[in-house]
Image (cartoon, helix red, strand yellow):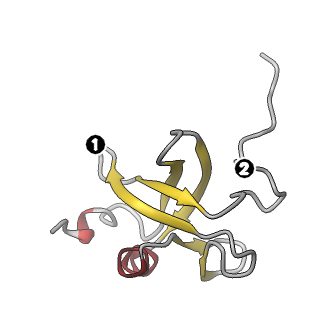
Amino acid sequence: MFDLNLLFQKSELIPVIIQNADTLQVLMLGFTNREAVERTLATRTAWFWSRSRQKLWQKGESSGNFLHVLEMRTDCDTDTLLYLCRPDGPTCHTGSESCFFREIAI
């Protein structure tokens, strides 16, 4: 079993990247704390910490568009998470499949 203390050595809040397990499309970026990770592990659905509302939230609790977590990975520094998920519907609150739909010309 992975030691969750390793994730939160530098900060109580860490980023989590959500990726579609089937297409590998990046769906969103959120933030998580230890309790949200524990709930994600227990329910196999994605939980986050809302920085604006200062509370835990489960993706899909109001929209019904849950993110079913199939895999969890950490980066080499053990300070960022990656969740490979199967979404029930659009991930973005705008109705888009991904939160990353705005292109910036370079």
In the rendering, which numbered label is found on residue 9?
Answer: none
Say few, some or many: other residues with alpha carbon within 10 Å of mark 2 (under 14 / 14 to 19 / 20 or more).
some
3D distance between C-alphas at marks 2 and 1: 28 Å
* Residue at position x 53%, y 39% in the image: 23
Q: Position of residue 29 (x, y in %)?
A: 59, 53
Residue in the foreground of this view, choosing between 44 and 105: 44
The three-letter amino acid code for the residue at tag 2 is Glu
Q: Earlier in the sequence, mark 2 or mark 1?
A: 1
Tell me, yes or no, whether the two marked residues, 2 and 1, touch with CB atoms within 8 Å.
no
Q: Position of residue 91 (x, y in %)?
A: 69, 58
Above-or-below relation of 30 to 38:
above
Residue furthest left as drawn: 1
Residue in the foreground of this view, choosing between 11 and 32: 32
Q: Position of residue 17 (x, y in %)?
A: 51, 51
- Is 42 left, or right, of 45 in this rendering? left
Q: Mark 2 or mark 1: which is in front?
A: 2
Say few, some or many: other residues with alpha carbon within 10 Å of mark 1 (under 14 / 14 to 19 / 20 or more).
few
Residue in the foreground of this view, choosing between 53 and 70: 70
Residue with the mark numbered 2: 97
**Secondary structure beneath disc 1?**
loop
* Residue at position x 84%, y 57% in the image: 94
- Is 51 left, or right, of 68 in this rendering? right
Residue with the mark numbered 1: 76
